[in-house]
Image (cartoon, rainbow, N blue to C red):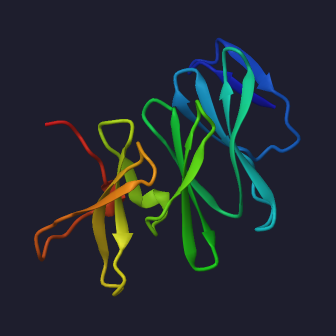
């Protein structure tokens, strides 16, 4: 079962019965959970879904195979997910309202990206073709095809991709 509770466990609620105990669960809004079905093997079809905790409504957002990484926009309306297909990283953006999904050809796992201050901007560290590190790009997912703009960084600058975050001035 998938259940939620307040931090003091005074209010407890069963949301959904499930056959698998290994769902990856995270909050994306105050009343919405993100669920990723467990990976049994690389050939298992996996579901990325949302669960409205008030209405107890499950909604499938995407399906994929193998290891998957996800990043929800701050509002929870956009899902960006990536997975490996051989040596290639495949990345998609999904609009929850319309259900429209489109590929973003950035060549980096979503774990190397962070949402900007707006709903439609991602900043990503993309591996250099030479293998000498990462370069940074701004990815606008508002329109299709997506716009990918390189971000200039000074030479000999050390950048920490693991702590990539964007904050207002």
Query: In the image, is 50 to the left or to the right of 2?
Result: left
Could you tell me which quadrant the C terminus lies in? top left
Q: Residue at x 71, y 15 (%)?
A: 55
| Residue 32 on image: x %, y % | 60, 26
Rendered image quadrant of residue 52: top right
Could you tell me which quadrant the N terminus lies in? top right
Toward the front, the furthest residue is: 144
Above-or-below relation of 145 to 128: above
Query: In the image, is 77 to the left or to the right of 68?
Result: left
Rendered image quadrant of residue 108: bottom left
Q: Residue at x 46, y 50 (%)?
A: 144
How many labels, in total?
Answer: 0
Q: Residue at x 41, y 42 (%)?
A: 142
Above-or-below relation of 109 to 30: below
Quick one: 17 or 93, which is closer to the camera? 93
Quick one: 15 or 134, which is closer to the camera? 134
| Residue 150 on image: x %, y % | 25, 64
| Residue 31 on image: x %, y % | 58, 20
């Amino acid at each position: 079962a998938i259940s939620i509770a307040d931090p003091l466990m005074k209010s407890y609620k069963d949301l959904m019965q499930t056959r698998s105990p290994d769902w990856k669960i995270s909050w994306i809004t105050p009343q919405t959970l993100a669920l990723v079905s467990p990976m049994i093997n690389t050939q298992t079809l996996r579901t990325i879904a949302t669960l409205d905790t008030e209405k107890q409504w499950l909604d499938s957002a995407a399906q994929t195979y193998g290891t998957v990484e996800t990043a929800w926009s701050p509002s929870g309306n956009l899902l960006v997910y990536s997975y490996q297909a051989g040596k290639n990283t495949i990345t998609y953006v999904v609009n929850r309202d319309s259900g429209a999904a489109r590929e973003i050809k950035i060549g980096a796992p979503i774990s190397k990206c962070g949402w900007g201050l707006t709903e439609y901007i991602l900043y990503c560290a993309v591996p250099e073709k030479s293998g000498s590190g990462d370069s940074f790009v701004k990815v606008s997912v508002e329109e299709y095809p997506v716009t990918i703009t390189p971000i200039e960084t000074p030479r000999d600058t050390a950048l920490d991709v693991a702590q990539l975050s964007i904050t207002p001035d």
